[in-house]
Image (tube, rainbow, N blue to C red):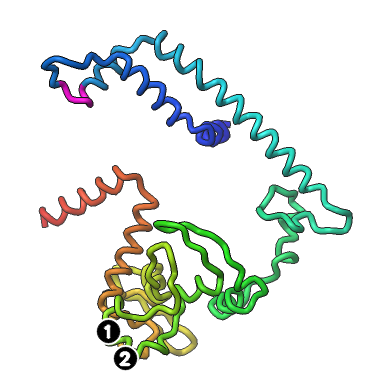
Amino acid sequence: MRNAIRLFLKDVKCQEILIEVLAGLVAAHWKVGGDDDTSVADKTTQVLTNLSVYQFGKEVASVLPHRLKERGDEVKREREERKKKLQVEEGKGKFTDLPETVYGTKDDFHKVLEIIDQPHANTLEQLIKECQDSKDSDDEFEAWNSGKNVTTPKKELDFIYFKHSDNKDWQEKDPKDWKPKHEFGGKRNPLRLEVFMHALSAKEEPQSVLVGAESVTRFVEYKFAPSLDKNDPRWLHAKEVDMVKLVICRFIQSQLTGQSLINAFGEADEKKRKS
């Protein structure tokens, strides 16, 4: 129930509504002029801490219930539309022609492998086939990355899985001088799949696993990847090591709140100082 309420209020954008209400109250109570050199932050704090329950409640009551009612009506309409979409013709699959996932029954869940089939044994091979050789591989879609980005599945595959036929001695050059196959848009530069593999598998210690009778080292020691033979699929350019670190840090940041991240780095610095 609480999760449902939380999601509903998030859609309503309650925080933004309350900020606007409070901004109006603060502006109305400011005493500006003369030699008053009180900072904006101090003035704001003074007004907020002295607002009466009546003042605040009156302003919120004039805005928030109306917006909650509007969102409630929107949700009803969305559900009605989804219900209509589910009323498919007899003999057609429940999910036929639907652009997004919808909730189904247990039977729908257990039939999923009949619908999408078993996963391919060679993931990379199938990924390339899906992006390059499917009927929609050249279909354009719009995404955003520091700006509008119109692209295709085939083009996006080249972002991480690109060849260097036009880049003679490319491994000797700085990655910024590698010639990309496309203008990727969104202020993006290609990032090889190997960088993501190292980021995904990064560990403090090297790790080997037994494949048949052969011991194989996985993508784990990214800091040493530039010293590998250039024919080794785990090889990285020295500049790509920094990109591995960036991918890892962005992932960590996405999993933590800003304060948690600050605390984590603070603890690390403290341990380093003591050692």
The crowding category of the residue bearing disc 1, from other C-alpha atoms within 10 Å (few below 14, some 14 to 19, many at least 20), is few
Left or right: where 87 falls relative to 43 = right
Quadrant containing the C terminus in the rendered view:
bottom left
Dot label at residue 188: none
Secondary structure state at the residue bearing disc 2: loop
Nearer to us in this view, 244 or 148? 148
The crowding category of the residue bearing disc 2, from other C-alpha atoms within 10 Å (few below 14, some 14 to 19, many at least 20), is few
Q: Which of the 4 quarters of the picture holds residue 146?
A: bottom left
Considering every residue shown, the one lying at the far front of the view is 34
Magenta stretch, main secondary structure, is helix
- Is 41 contained in the magenta span? yes
Q: Which of the 4 quarters of the picture holds residue 40?
A: top left
Q: Three-letter amino acid code at disc 1?
A: Lys
Between marks 2 and 1, how big is the CA–CA gap? 7 Å
Quadrant containing the N terminus in the rendered view:
top right
Residue designated by label 2: 169
Left or right: where 147 falls relative to 36 = right
Judge whether 166 appears above or below 145 on screen.
below
Q: Residue at x 16, y 21 (%)?
A: 38
- Is residue 108 visible in the rendered image? The answer is yes
Q: Three-letter amino acid code at disc 2?
A: Asp
Q: Residue at x 46, y 11 (%)?
A: 58
Nearer to us in this view, 161 or 257? 161
**Residue 101's spot in the image, x, y percent?**
66, 53
Residue designated by label 1: 173
Left or right: where 18 falls relative to 205 = right
**Residue 128's spot in the image, x, y percent?**
56, 78
Q: Are marks 2 and 1 in contact (CB under 8 Å)?
A: yes
Secondary structure state at the residue bearing disc 1: loop
Judge whether 110 appears above or below 202 on screen.
above
Judge whether 147 appears above or below 261 on screen.
below
Q: Which residues are magenta?
A: 38-42
